[in-house]
Image (cartoon, rainbow, N blue to C red):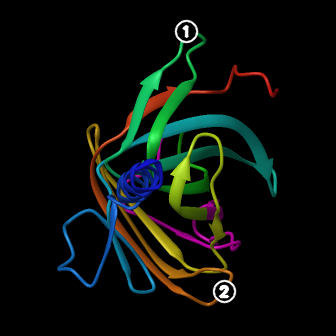
Amino acid sequence: MKSLYRVFIGALVLSMVFSGCKKDEEAPDNFLHAGDANCVLTHGNLIYYSSSTHNSTPFYVYGIELFSQGVTLSTGTTGHPVYSGSGVEVYISLFSSESPRPADGDDYVYHEWSSTANHALNEGYYSLDFTVSKSAYSNFADGNVTVQSHGDQYTITYKGNDEDGIAIELQYTGKLKYYDGSGWEEK
């Protein structure tokens, strides 16, 4: 009886972990395609980290975090984002010359500074099994991100490959919780 109970609990935990990601289903409007996995993205954060210069031109560093259902986002007492639950996570780090918020309609190419605007896709990664305590991540190896903003609504698209050559595509349209992390100390 105890082993049947353990199998049931194990199956329940696994179904919760993979609930944000399904295979071979029709794609929703907000999605991450990673190989044959189709994941629904439901919410996220936009975090401004700092500013610096490139070729004597100032630029801003910010991150976009996107999550599936199953991951709960909140703000801790220190003002930092707090995460709980499990599901899918995508993280995109961008450099932009426009402002601490993404410029409307900008394209960010992986590790390539634009000649017309001082910005780039610095890094990105995703996890199909995100948890706060332990996650396996796959890094972006190339690609292009486009960010469009309409007030507090954002449309983010990415197309590229991960470090294992798996084709990655994502699209997200919706609100992002904005954090000004420029005053946060590294720990």
Disc 2 target residue = 164
Q: Nearer the viewer, residue 53 or 15?
A: 15
What residue is rendered at 31% in x and 67% in y? 31
Which badge, 2 or 1, is on the more N-terminal residue?
Answer: 1
Residue 3 x, y percent position in the rendering: 47, 54
Q: Residues within 10 Å of mark 1 (few under 14, many from 20)?
A: few
Q: Is residue 105 magenta?
A: yes
Q: Amino acid at mark 2?
A: Asp
Residue 44 x, y percent position in the rendering: 40, 43
Secondary structure beneath dot 1 equals loop
Label total for image: 2
Q: Main secondary structure of the magenta part?
A: loop
Disc 1 target residue = 77
Residue 29 x, y percent position in the rendering: 20, 66
Seen from this angle, which residue lies furthest top? 77
User: What segment carries the magenta color?
Assistant: 101-124
In the image, which disc is placed on residue 186? none
